[in-house]
Image (tube, grey):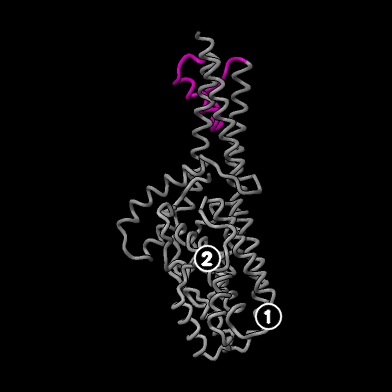
Amino acid sequence: MLLLLHIVVFLLGASLVVYTLGSAIRTFVLPRSASDMVSFMVFLLVFRIFSIGLSRVQSYERKDRMLAFYAPISLLALPVVWLALVLIGYMGMFWALGVSSWWLAFNMSGSSLLTLGFAQGNDIFKILLTFSEAAAGLILVALLISYLPTMYSAFSRRESAVSMLAVRAGTPPSAVTMLTRYYSLQKLDKLSELWETWEMWFVDVEESHTSLAALSFYRSPRPQRSWVTAAGAVLDAASLITSTVDVPHDPQAGLCIQAGFLALQHVADFFSIPYNSHPQSDDPIRITREEYDIACEQLAREGVPLKADREQTWKDFAGWRVNYDTVLIALATLTMAPEAPWSSDRRLETPHLSLKLRRRQ
């Protein structure tokens, strides 16, 4: 019976180590979106701790300063949790191989994991376990070190475009501001270059924010900027150009919208945000007709040429917006983005979309 207990403990310890290494691989190595329970629990626990402080803060600027630490602290907590799980797993294996007490097993496991060398095995099996645990500890630390440059490179690419958009669309970014500025510079015909740039930006965000999920919660250097609100402003501007502004048809605007809503949907998929993946053009959106008419009046006052049939242009705009309406607002809620027109200035009414963080189903 005692032998069976030792075998069970050894297998449980080995399984915990394998699962932990798999968690690190899914988070840091696998070049595709993959949910992971350990990462989810760490980010959720850190968020719960942050929520205590956030509930006592009123100004958005102070909340933003606090939230700027959320993703980095969560990320640095991950290897600590992984190392602790590996230590526990090897404790069980050392005990199962005959180490006389759990305290001695803890000493041996900790000495091996941190390569301290003050506790060593006295037979070949314990020595092999010591070597393998030391290697596992080094691998986990090396994965984090190699992960950070990749992530910050993607962050830098993302924020460069967001910062450039502030010149074109204001802060917070607005589709109406963007179109009026381009019109005043007589560059509406140059928007095709912008759509192409942002099409590539959306492709990059889709790849980076699903394989490096922590990036979604890394905040912009400026409190009033956000990758989510920037995406919303560009998509709304492209939708207005395609549906409402009286300019020659530009297929690049449609490609930009498609790249944009696909990117946002794939990021939403990672966080299990519910949305209709096949919406109809007449499905309701969270932009009211009154808001749309006000935007058109603002454009008209600045001299931007608009198509005459307002009823049809509203239907066309809504037909584009419906593709990204839900996921845009949900991601703005999830990341606590600063308030911006037509994105973070409204909330979804779905009860379970007080998301904060949710495990992928």
Name the residue tied to disc 1: 249
Disc 1 vs disc 2: which is toward the camera? Answer: 2
Q: Nearer the viewer, residue 312 or 174?
A: 312
Residue 219, image x, y percentages: 49, 61
- Which residue is the extreme one toward the right? 251
| Percent of width and height locating residue 45 | 42, 44
Residue at horizontal 54%, vertical 55%?
268
Q: Earlier in the sequence, mark 1 or mark 2?
A: 1
In three-dimensional space, the C-alpha distance between marks 1 and 2, rounded to whole angstroms, equals 24 Å
Q: Which is more toward the observer, 63 or 273?
A: 273
- In this picture, residue 359 sits left or right of residue 254: left
Question: Badge 2 local density, few (<14 within 10 Å), some, or many (20+)?
Answer: few
29 in relation to 99, above or below: below
Residue 70: give its label: none
Rendered residue at 56%/79% (across/down): 313
**Left/right of residue 106 with respect to residue 150 in the rendered view:** left
The disc at residue 283 is 2
The magenta stretch is 99-123
**x then y, percent, for residue 358:** 47, 48
Q: Amino acid at mark 1?
A: His
Residue 340 lies in quadrant: bottom left
User: For residue 111: magenta?
Assistant: yes
